[in-house]
Image: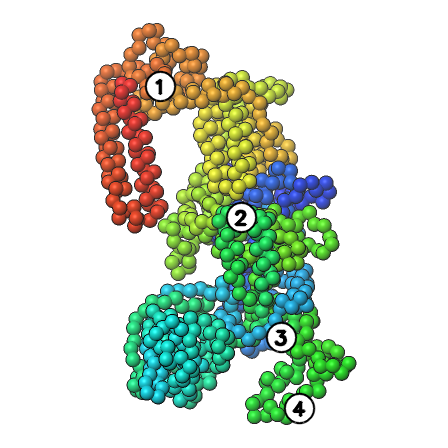
Amino acid sequence: MKFASAYEPGEFEPDIYAAWEAAGEFLPRKTDIGKTYSIVMPPPNANGNLHIGHGLTVALEDSMTRYHRLLGDSTWYIPGADHAGFETWVVYERALEKEGKTRFMYTREELYAQVWNFVQDQRGNMELQLRALGASCSWKDLTFTLDENVVRRVYTTFEKMWKDGMIYRGEKLVNYCPKHQTAFADIEVEYKDEKGKLWDIAYVYDGGEVVVSTTRPETLFGDTAVAVNPEDERYKDLVGTRVELPLTGRMIPIIADEHADPEYGTGVVKITPAHDPNDFEVGERHDLERIRVIDDEGKMMNCGEGYDGLTTEECRKKVLKDLKDAGLLRSEKKIEHAVAHCYKCGTVIEPTLKEQWFIDVERLAAAAIKHLEAGEIKFFPASKEKVLINYLKGLKDWNISRQIPWGIAIPMFHRADIVEKAELDVDTVGDGVADTASGALNVSGEEAPEWVFDTRTNLKEIEVGGVRYIRDEDTFDTWFSSSHWPIVCTNWEENYPNPYYPLNVMETGADILFAWVARMIMMGIYVTGEVPFREVYLHGLVLDEHGQKMSKSKGNVINPMDLVTKYGSDAFRLGILRGRSAGMNQAFSENSVVAGRNLCNKLWNISRYVQGLVDENTDTESGELTTENMGEDWICREINETSAKIQRQMKHYRFSEAVETLYSLVWDKYADWFVESQKIYKNTELLKRTLESMLIMLHPFAPFVTEAIWQSLSWTDEMIIEQKWPEEFEYDPISAENFDRLTEVVSEIRRTMQALPGGKKWPILYGDDSLVDDNSLLVKFLSRASGIASTEGSPRGLRLAIANREIYLDVPADVIEKYRDALDEKILAVGRELDGLNARMMNPNYVDKAPAKLVEETRLAIEEKTALIERLKGEREAI
């Protein structure tokens, strides 16, 4: 391939990716596997476009995969696509609403088929975008979360849990969205601080009243007790007595329970077990009745005439008016409190009493904690291990039922006679029960179980042992099915050794440590007997350049594909990895992508220059690699050290540091010093080998440009993706150290010449200095001086501030005087800046109250200014 004059990513990237894929470069080795490296992609939403978080995920995971491929490991990067149960359903239900339709107009089978077609139409976009980002994953192994093998494994696990007594059907309070009419797990609820009110309401008894504080007066119809703290002396004599529930005439007990906070309001709280999670637990402790007064649509029920059918907001207004008219409303105070919302539509979550399928997580959590405390999984950042263990210790039973049609159907069937009895009108229950009771006996004459496990979820009704059963209409919580992700992606099977399981690493967002990572660990151990992965790398959120969370409402969302189109995939990858630390939410701006593009262009231009030198070299038969001067020894040392450093950084998932290390090698070392020096020496064999090494080390982070260069070079074979990590160069360490000293001399010459007035290039004079004398031509060339000569015992001009060296710039006295005055002014100016910074740090209000990041920046600025003043004073004294 001929070297193009400039690197235009759009002209190279699609063809390069197609070539990789066609050659099977992403597939794991089938024979002579050797050391394996496996990683699975957290599945993006199949029907959506990739967002900035996905861009970071691919940059991280693909860098790991390509790095280990270069090390010679048999890599298996498994892509995925998520059916995204609730998220997809919300999008589709919104589309139905636009057509004037609702979900209730269709059967579950019809809805499932419609959404399946909808998702399949969209899936290709996401997969194309992953390719554009350079994800070197094994596409033939792509796993969709509704694939048959996924469903089969999930059903196998569920059946095992059912038989092990870990699955149960129970009536509990669940987080419920009235708009979408489905339950959520605790971790899926979004809490928002809102302004609200606290009302004090009188509950009357013979001879007096107790004043109850509440934020939800509309639920008083479901009250079954009033609670006070057992240590609250104000109400001790009332415990065990009864009060009249306002607006109802019903009498309820006053109980003592630690849930009541003496400092909250009046210290007396209403207990509504069917509509508050804390009250539900109080009700469990005191065996209280549960009265449901809000239905699945968020409307009032069982409240009586005038209230039933109202929305909760309408009911609240009416209740407050009626309480005021009855003389029972004592006060109203403004407060701020956290209110639970649906994370998709913003509807206030209603804690609702429902029968659902739950997992008793005690055994799962205990096993996970045991393996974690044994150190079987390493976390990055390490602090997350303790956080996860503490979470597991307090984990509540897991609600796995969801009331949406899109997802994996729960494989449970309810005995028909019980279902039909529940559906009968209350006035006709008697005859109905008698007619259906016979259906409860199986062919053996035994009473049939109330629930049976069966995978024929495509059928609404089945018959088992002569007894009719009706399908449960709920689907699994997506986190339940996705907890099997490492298992299903690697095709793990019982009694079948799988060299790719457990995964080497699980990379995902820190925000789903509890929702997903915890569940994968519990499920992996339960199903396979071992942890599902050896290491976990958690990335933080990608914030905008001002450190704000990205959202459509703020208008600060960055589309990664826009940046890829504008700057290229490599530029985006380099940009998003820079400044990124494990587990931390960090800012990102387009400027970092621009810097990535500049690095790609620099690499391209360096490579074209090297190719030009190779083309000029007539000694094409040599092929012998030798170092002929100290600059060549130095670059060999620098490449060796860079290679070792990157390997350490990748082992500890320090991606940002690895990228910075490579930036430094390309810009500061290879381009600024080595290539410049080679304009004199032209060691083409070393130029070729060092360029190859640099390209290979950069390949995991910038795969496209490195492959494009590799294919454009005249002497390289195959593809860069097929290469192995560079071997070390041999070099003379003393010679390399001498070049370090030479760069210090040249750097000081360059800096001083730039600082002198007039912008002229001056000649260099040196005293008894063998380093400069032996390399005078190189010093002159690199420093861009107008000449170089020995002082011959008669020094003159401006002496440079280099310890133990006698080097001068041959400039006239008036230039030296102006430079001295400029140094004096600079020292004074920096001193004033330093005084201001020190004064800021001496202010205790600043140190204690300012953001920690700002305080740290001030400390660093003080260190920099102090060092600058010392350097300027040294220069001043040398004149």
- Of badges 3 and 2, the one in the foreground is 2
| Image disc number at residue 803 | 1
Which residue has dot 2 on it? 379
> Which residue type carries mark 3?
Asp
User: Which of these two is toward me, 67 or 435?
Assistant: 435
Residue 559 coordinates in the image, percent (x, y): 46, 53
The residue drawn where x is 52% and y is 51% is 385
Is there CB contact under 8 Å for labels 3 and 2?
A: no
| Image disc number at residue 472 | 3
Q: Earlier in the sequence, mark 3 or mark 2?
A: 2
**In the depicted structure, whether residue 196 falls above or below residue 854:** below
Is there CB contact under 8 Å for labels 1 and 2?
A: no
Label 2 Cα neighbours within 10 Å, binned few <14 / some 14-19 / many ≥20: many
Label 3 Cα neighbours within 10 Å, binned few <14 / some 14-19 / many ≥20: some
Q: Quadrant of residue 262?
A: bottom left
CA gap, disc 1 and disc 2: 47 Å
Q: Quadrant of residue 480?
A: bottom right
Which residue has dot 4 on it? 434
Residue 824 coordinates in the image, percent (x, y): 23, 26
Is there CB contact under 8 Å for labels 1 and 4?
A: no
CA gap, disc 4 and disc 2: 60 Å
> Which residue type carries mark 4?
Ala
Label 1 Cα neighbours within 10 Å, binned few <14 / some 14-19 / many ≥20: few
* For residue 874, side relative to residue 289 (left or right): left
